[in-house]
Image (cartoon, rainbow, N blue to C red):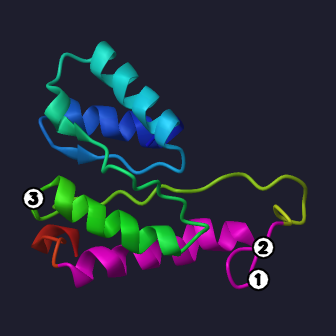
Amino acid sequence: ASSGIGREVAAELARQGHTVVMGCRSAARCSAARVEILARLDVPGSRLVIPPDAALDLARLSTAARFASATGEATGGAAIELLVLNAGFVPLGSGGSGRSGESGLEEGLYAMYYGHQALVRGLASLHLLGPSAT
């Protein structure tokens, strides 16, 4: 939610009155995006939540479980009614990023597929997904 479509979706949902949990690879960029959204829109800061110490890099599956747990703590266990899975990046060159994820598979595959699954499983295991999010 630190840039592009993710940031704009977060802003629009907050503008509509929803509480938005922002997940970003970089805590600094996430905080900057939150500040920018709050300055641009006249919405209460409580609508944009960044779980503490929970950077979400979906190319690193270990961050998904940590982020799910931190989300539960930051929201008091409130059910998630809408889950926007928008992580991704454009690999450089025609052969992908060339970087390997935790088990040796190409990093983009983790960030745009396996990481989303790991995050959903983590949230579901903590019973944080409401009926409309499943």
Identify the residue position indicated by label 2 in the image.
Answer: 100
Q: Which quadrant of the figure contains the C terminus?
A: bottom left
Is mark 2 in CB contact (under 8 Å) with mark 1? yes
Where are the magenta residues, as a range? 99-126
Is mark 1 in CB contact (under 8 Å) with mark 3? no
Q: Which quadrant of the figure contains the N terminus?
A: top left
The residues bearing labels 2 and 3 have C-alpha atoms spaced at a distance of 35 Å
Is mark 2 in CB contact (under 8 Å) with mark 3? no
Identify the residue position indicated by label 3 in the image.
Answer: 76
Residue 82, compared with residue 125, is above or below; it is: above
Residue 15, image quadrant: top left
Q: Which amino acid type is marked by label 1?
A: Gly
Q: Secondary structure at mark 2?
A: loop
The numbered mark, 1 or 3, whose residue comes first in the sequence reads 3
Residue 97 location (% of width, % of height): 82, 61
Residue 60, image quadrant: bottom right
Residue 122 location (% of width, % of height): 33, 78
Residue 6, compared with residue 53, is above or below; it is: above
Q: Residue at x 71, y 69 (%)?
A: 107
Q: Residue at x 15, y 35 (%)?
A: 46
Q: Residues within 10 Å of mark 1 (few under 14, many from 20)?
A: few
- Residue mark closest to the camera, 2 vs 3: 3
Residue 16 colored magenta? no
Q: Which amino acid type is marked by label 2?
A: Ser
Residue 6 location (% of width, % of height): 44, 43
Identify the residue position indicated by label 1 in the image.
Answer: 104
* Viewer-nearest residue: 50 or 14: 50
Residue 6, compared with residue 134, is above or below; it is: above
